[in-house]
Image: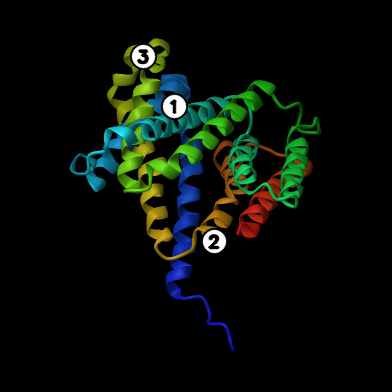
Amino acid sequence: MQQSAPSSSSYLAVLLVLCAEVLIYCSASWAKHLFPVVGAEGVTTYRLFFSAAVLALVSRPWQKPIPRDEWRPHLLFGVGLGGMFLFSYAAIRYVPLGISVGVQMLGPLVIALAASRRPRDFAWVGLAAAGIWLLLRPDAVGLVDMRGVALAGAAAGCWAMYIWFGKAACARDCCAALALAMFTGGVATLPLSLVTVGGALLESSSLLFGLLLALSSAAVPCLLEMQALRRITPKVYGTLMSLAPAVAALMGCFWLDEQLSAGQWGGIASVVAASAGMTLAAE
């Protein structure tokens, strides 16, 4: 029996996911230009609070109250999201965007490995580890700043936390759960922003840039991905998301003139292959 060709709806979903990824990492590149004004902390606060407001308007979470016994995963989901944004922005102060995202991919890989425990999946983790080694080894481009690597590693841990608690938090209404998570993450990171940048957070030009950043980096990509997930399976979606380090590296090259060596591009390819392989091998 001949297998049916993918529908136009599936192709549209693939395009939506790719557009979301490009938006996310274009926005990360643009955000770096705001660091001298409000720092990584202020950018994180803008992204979280403005995105929470947009998603709340779409999902209206106040119409769907959360039972008291379900608050814990929602709060931890939000803390994980806030930490992921904060550490990922802080990391790109010191290392190229592609390297940062490559290291951060360890978070989802570890979660996938913990859920599987199949011996063959250790091969994918080994491939990812080899990719990370290629990303970090000294080469013609120069030494990689280990401060950025450590911050990207912290973002990976928060990403793992976000995935782990997101399964329970998103069981009822994913958009509403994300709106609450964005707000929770914003509350968690706001004190740090106030201490480090203070009144600069309230400057009109910075607020406008922060709103545009939130729309392009979180709110719009989230809505695009939710539309895509209605048309493709989670496995296909996960495979497409595995391209994140490559997309990030390309956006860093284009917008920030970040240069990577051939070995580092090979490392990114290894991390992408490991993530895609583990996703496709999942049962």
- Tell me the number on the disc at residue 278: none
Among all residues in the image, which is located at the extreme bottom? 1
Earlier in the chain: of badge 3 and badge 1, it is: 1
Disc 3 secondary structure class: helix
Work out how far the residue at label 1 is from the one at label 2, CA to CA, in angstroms.
34 Å
Disc 2 secondary structure class: helix
Quarter assignment of residue 98: top right
> Which label sits in the foreground, 3 or 2?
2
Mark 1 crowdedness (10 Å alpha carbons): few <14, some 14-19, many ≥20: some
Image location of residue 259, percent across then percent down: 68, 38
The residue that label 2 is drawn on is 236
Image location of residue 68, percent across then percent down: 28, 32
Quarter assignment of residue 49: top left
> Which label sits in the foreground, 1 or 2?
2
Work out how far the residue at label 3 is from the one at label 2, CA to CA, in angstroms.
41 Å
Disc 1 secondary structure class: helix
The C terminus - image quarter? bottom right
- Tell me the number on the disc at residue 194: 3
Work out how far the residue at label 3 is from the one at label 1, CA to CA, in angstroms.
16 Å
Residue in the picture at 61% in, 34% down: 100
The answer to whether residue 185 is above or below residue 215 is above
Mark 3 belongs to which amino acid? Leu
The residue that label 1 is drawn on is 34
For the question of whether residue 261 can be seen, the reply is no
Is residue 251 shown left or right of residue 48? right
Mark 2 crowdedness (10 Å alpha carbons): few <14, some 14-19, many ≥20: some
Mark 1 belongs to which amino acid? Leu
